[in-house]
Amino acid sequence: MNRPVEALPHALQPYWDLSLAAVQAEALQLALAEDLFETLASPCTPEALAQMHAWQPEATRHWLTLLWSMQLLDRSRDAASEWHYASSEVARRYLTSSSALDCGDAWRFRLASLRDFGAGLANGLRGEKRPAPLANGERWAVAARGHLAREQAAVTAPAACELVAYRRATESAWRLLDLGGGPGLVAVALAKAFPYMHGVVFELPEAADVAAQHIAEAGLASRLEARGGDLVRDDIGTGYDLIWCSSVLHFVPELSACLAKLHAALKPGGELICVHAEIPEEPEAARRMLSYYLPLLWQGRRVTQAGELRQALLAQGFEVCEAQPIALPMAPATALVARRRTK
C-alpha cells in the first residue's frame, strides 16, 4: 500500500491565519496587562497561578498552553506529571516590566495604532478621514518619551553598535550625526561603545529636548549635543565622519535635496548609514513590510521600491559600499552604507 502524501497547506490557509493571529494577539495583550511574564520568572503550575489571581483553573491552563506554543513560555513536568510554566528567554528579556529592554508597552502601542488604522481603511479609501501626520513635533516627542525610546534601546541601538563596529575603531576619534534621532538612545549607545566619539542628535525641537534629557542622564553632555531644527530649512552641521539615518527619508519632501544635504555634511571619505525599508518585489516579503508601512503610504509619505534608494544615493555622488539586511521586529529593513568620495 502506498504511503499517503503529506498534506500541503490549503490555498486559503494564509488568510485563515490572519484570524488566528487575532487570538494570539489578545493572549499576549492579556499576559502583558496581568504582568504574567514577571510573575512567571519562577515556574508555576496553572492551578497555583489561577488560585493566586482568582482565575478559572481550566481557562488558565489553556491560556498558558497557547503562550507556550507562541514560545513566550517554557514548560516542564514535575515528578507528579504536573506542568510547570515559566517565562521564556525572549519574554524575560523583552516583555517583563523589570527588564531594561522591556518592549511590552511599545508592542501594545503598535497593536492599538495598527488596529485603529486597519479599522479606518474603508474611510481612508473614500477620502472621508485621513490619519494625523506622524511628524508633528509634539506627537514625536511623546513617542520619544514612550514606545520609541523602548524600541531604540532594545532593538535599534544594538543594531547600530554592531554595524558601526565594523566601520570604526573603538580607540579612534570621530564625529557622529544621528539624524532624526528621536530619544537619542542610538547616539548614547554609540558614545558608550566608542569613548572618543563626539556627535550631534538632530531632531524636531520638542523631541530634541527629550534626547537632551537622555544624554544628560547618561552623563554624556560633554560629548553629545541635541540640536532641534527642521531638516529641510535648518543647518545640520558639517564635517561628520558618520551619519546615522534611520527611517528619516520616509518623511522628507524631496529625497534628492535631502541626500545632497547629507552628502555635503560628511567629510570626504565619511559614511552615511541609511537604514530604511523598501518595498520588495517578492510578494511574501512585501506583505510583511506593507502591513507595517501602509499607514505611511496612506498619508502620502515615501516608501521606496527595492533598489530605488540605492540609485538615489548614487545620483547624489555617493559610493554605495555595502547593503546589509537588518531584522527589525515589525518589518525588515536594509542598511545601505554610502561613502562620500575623497575626490
Image: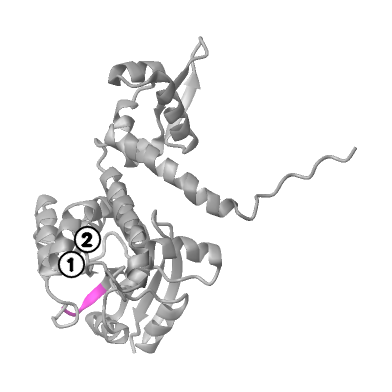
Give the mark count: 2
Label 2 sits on residue? 187
Q: Residue at x 35, y 79 (%)?
A: 339
Where does residue 129 sit, x and y in percent of width and height?
Answer: 27, 69
The reply to whether the C-beta atoms of the residues labelled 1 and 2 are less than 8 Å apart is yes
**Is 122 placed left or right of 193 in the picture?**
right
Q: Residue at x 31, y 68 (%)?
A: 247
* 90 over 263 or under it: above or below: above
Quarter of image, res 309: bottom left
**Is 152 placed left or right of 2 in the picture?**
left
Where does residue 91 sit, x and y in percent of width and height?
Answer: 37, 37
**Is 132 placed left or right of 1 in the picture?**
left
Stretch of the chain drawn in magenta = 237-241
Which secondary structure dominates the residues rendered in magenta? loop
> Closer to the N terminus: mark 1 or mark 2?
2
Residue 51 visible to an observer of this rendering: yes
**What amino acid is found at the position of numbered circle 1 in the picture?**
Gly
User: Which residue is most to the right?
Assistant: 1
Q: Residue at x 34, y 76 (%)?
A: 302
**What amino acid is found at the position of numbered circle 2 in the picture?**
Ala
Q: Nearer the viewer, residue 91 or 50?
A: 50
Label 1 sits on residue? 199
